[in-house]
Structures are given as C-alpha cells and as structure tokens.
Image (tube, rainbow, N blue to C red):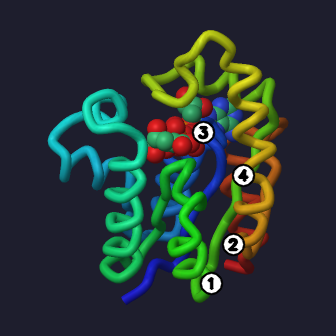
Amino acid sequence: MSPKFVVVGPPGAGKTTISEMLAARLGLPFRDVDADIVALAGKPISDIFTDDGEPVFRAMEEEAVAKALVEHEGVLALGGGAVLSATTRERLREHTVVFLNVGMAEGVRRTGLSSARPLLSGVNPRATFKALLDARLPLYREVATIEVATDALEPEQVTDAVIKGVGE
Ligand SMILES: Nc1ncnc2c1ncn2[C@@H]1O[C@H](COP(=O)(O)OP(=O)(O)OP(=O)(O)O)[C@@H](O)[C@H]1O
Ligand SMILES: O=C(O)C1=C[C@@H](O)[C@@H](O)[C@H](O)C1
Ligand SMILES: [Mg+2]
C-alpha cells in the first residue's frame, strides 16, 4: 500500500484543507499525520511541544509519517516540518508529492486565523515565518513532484491546479 498523493508545505499553505478537498473530489480516503500524532499522544501538538519539547515531537512525527506512508492509500497530508527529517525526505522519494507553497504575508494571515501553532506563537510571527520559509523551501522542493503557489487562489482553485498538475 502507498498513498496516491502526499501533501507538504509550510503552515497555512492549506495542506489539511486541500488534501480533504482533493480526497473528496477523487473519492479517496484522507489522512493527516498531525491528527495521527495527536491521537497517539492523547494531547494537542502545542502540548507536546510544551511538555516534551520539539525533538520528541520530531521523533514521533518521523515514525508517524513512516507508518502512514506504509498504511495509507489515499491522500496524505504531512505536518509543515516533516521534511526537516532527512530520513523522511528519503522515504518520500518513491511517492507523488504535492508541495503547496504560500508566501510570508498570506501564510501569517492564514495561520493567524486558526488554531495554535507552537512554532508561530512567538512575538514576531512574520520574522519567524520568513525564517521558516527560508530554511525549508529547498527541502520542500527536494521532495516535490509538483509545486502550486496558493497565495492568490481559493481552495477550490488550488485543488483544480493539483489535479491538473498530477495529471488526474
Ligand atoms: N487557498 C486558500 N485561500 C484562503 N484560505 C485558505 C486557503 N487554503 C487554506 N486556507 C485557510 O488557511 C487556514 C490554514 O489552512 P490549513 O489548516 O489547511 O493549513 P495547513 O497547511 O494544514 O497548516 P498546518 O501546517 O498548520 O497544519 C485555514 O483557516 C484554511 O481555511
Ligand atoms: O511547521 C511545523 O513545524 C509544524 C506544522 C504543523 O503542521 C505541526 O506539525 C506542528 O505544529 C509543527
Ligand atoms: Mg494541517
């Protein structure tokens, strides 16, 4: 078994939103590794960061991604930082990976609207988001089969672009 599509990108790129839409459009099951980790840990990701620290979260994430890549057959959304693991990047080589990109301004706007994100909860979310993008863009691009810039697109349009991009 293997996911049909794996979706990566920075926080607020729309991985969860678009993966759900894509799965519904293609009649495939959807799975989100962040949700797997929350279920496994029995607490929110922000609590894992606070109680256990980021390295513990990253180790859990690497394992959770590996398990989902083996088990899941539909659309799989990864957490925003999953590509930080070289082991995960290596595992993604054999998969069709959709990179949803978002710029700093729109990314900060979108993440400011929704639930707690431990990495962006500091005093200067714009600077934090920019540093995160600078560090991760090459990693997302390393694993990507296709890249979609989502800034100026509505979720339905992003989903259309993904379907077109992967030739479905
Ligand atoms: N193309 C879009 N246009 C406008 N808003 C969007 C778009 N895509 C997602 N959003 C909104 O941005 C917010 C973040 O989206 P979502 O949770 O899907 O991002 P994510 O990539 O899964 O983030 P995380 O890495 O934190 O899990 C949500 O409120 C969602 O409705
Ligand atoms: O970008 C990140 O490093 C993260 C994104 C989220 O999906 C979660 O996996 C967690 O909040 C870390
Ligand atoms: Mg998400």
Q: Is residue 145 left or right of residue 78?
A: right
Residue neighbourhood size for the residue with mark 2, other residues' Cα within 10 Å, grouped as few (<14), some (14–19), many (≥20): many
Tell me how many marks there are. 4
Identify the residue under disc 2: 143
What separation in Å lies between label 2 and label 1 (alpha carbons)?
A: 6 Å
- First along the sequence among labels 2 and 4: 4
Amino acid on which the number 1 mark rests in the picture: Arg
Q: Which of marks 4 and 3 is in front?
A: 4
Amino acid on which the number 2 mark rests in the picture: Val
Residue 14 lies, with reference to residue 27, above or below; the image says above
What separation in Å lies between label 2 and label 4 (alpha carbons)?
A: 11 Å
Per the rendering, the mark at residue 93 is: 1
| Quadrant of the snapshot with the N terminus | bottom left
Identify the residue under disc 4: 136
Per the rendering, the mark at residue 152 is: none
What separation in Å lies between label 1 and label 4 (alpha carbons)?
A: 17 Å
Q: Residue at image x 52%, y 70%?
A: 26
Where is residue 33? Give x, y as percent.
38, 57
Where is residue 109? Give x, y as percent.
69, 20
- Nearer-the-camera pick, 73 or 62: 62
Q: Which of marks 1 and 4 is in front?
A: 4
Identify the secondary structure beneath mark 2: helix
Identify the secondary structure beneath mark 1: loop
Residue 140 lies, with reference to residue 91, above or below; the image says above
Identify the residue under disc 3: 11
Ligand 1 near label 3 (Cβ, under 8 Å)? yes
Where is residue 67? Give x, y as percent.
31, 74
